[in-house]
Image: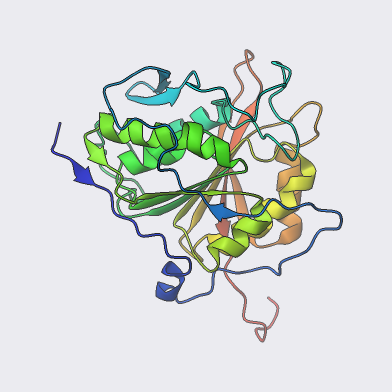
Amino acid sequence: MNDEAPFRFNFDVGAEASKESEDCSRSPKRPREGEELVPAEVVEVEGSGWSGDGDNDEGYGIQEVGNSIRLWKVVKLLEQSTLVQGLDESTDLVPGRYEGGFKVWECSVDLCQYLMQLYNLGESDGKDGNGSKHGDLQGKSVLELGCGQGLPGILCLAHGASSVVFQDFNKEVLRSVTYPCVEKNARHHGKQTNGAATYISGDWSGCRDLLGKQCYDLVLAAETIYEPKSIPSLLDLLSSCVKPKTGVVLVAAKVYYFGVGGGVAPFEQAVKEQGLFDLDHVFRVDDGASNMREILMLKTKPRRDPGAPDL
């Protein structure tokens, strides 16, 4: 294992945008009737319970990702969360209160596996393969939306991303599981985050305001399109935060979410209606033993000159 190799990141809203030749914002912000927003904020994680002891495994377990990568995850909260007190054990989410962030969902693991394929990621010590047509993760800026434990973003940090912003609806999820997971995995690989990871909580509409014109090379989202009514806000945010021309969005989801109505088809239709992204189906799980799942890749469509003639 190498000596500690620091990640580098200074979170400055709008700083990256000054380096871009194009404004990331591509669609007008649309207030939604009756929508109750949870204000977005940068979450202070110091003193949130992380002991700083990379060798203390209490409360953690291993998540296998493919055949070669193992990530630490939180399997038991060391302190009872006020978010889940009084909830039925069979309840994974309560709209407007708890969005299931303590759990590692199937699509989060799918997303890790696809990132391994996409960027030819190698062993769990952070060594990469020979690259791919998408390049590698070295120096890339990453935003993970609805992160929960944040395993896809953690994988990106471990393989050279210069910065990852972890976003979750619940501040307590970020403090209780995301931050400890990030630090545990970094220490396991002999690294320090040193500001490479930033944590923001709140509604996607508020996050759009908080991020300003910040643009990202890679935007990740797993299990975020389970409710149709949340899809427009997600697309508004995506249209404003992915780098034009070169940015990539990966959305991992179940084909259909029983009981709530969301899934791949409603999202794909909304993308088509918005008209700002090209969409490809790049990964599918249909093993007969679990819910059918997919990963969708979105890339911004070229901007058309308003004065250009129709083809």
Residue at 47 percent across and 65 percent down: it is 13
Q: Position of residue 139 (x, y in %)?
A: 31, 55
User: Which residue is drawn at the image coordinates 19% and 44% (left, top)?
Assistant: 5
Q: Does any portion of residue 309 appear in the rendered image?
A: yes
Residues 211 and 258: in front is: 211
- Where is residue 16 shown, x and y percent of the image? 42, 68
Farthest bottom residue in view: 307
Q: Quadrant of residue 252?
A: top right
Quadrant where the N terminus is found in the figure: top left
In front here: 121 or 73? Answer: 73
* Residue at left offset 35%, top offset 43%: 157
Q: Quadrant of residue 281?
A: top right
Query: Considering only vertical position in the picture, is 138 above or below 82?
Result: below
The residue under the point 78% across, 43% down is: 228
Q: Which of the colour schemes (rainbow, by chain, secondary structure, one colour) is used?
A: rainbow
Q: Is residue 150 visible?
A: no
Identify the image quadrant of residue 291.
Answer: top right
- Where is residue 193? Give x, y as percent: 31, 45
Looking at the rendered image, the quarter that the C terminus falls into is bottom right
Pick the front one: 46 or 290: 46
Total marks shown come to 0
Name, please, the residue furthest toward the right: 34
| 178 left or right, relative to 140 | right
Name the outermost residue toward the top: 289
Q: Horizontal placement of 200 versus 208: left or right?
A: left
Residue 150 horizontal/vertical position (percent): 48, 36
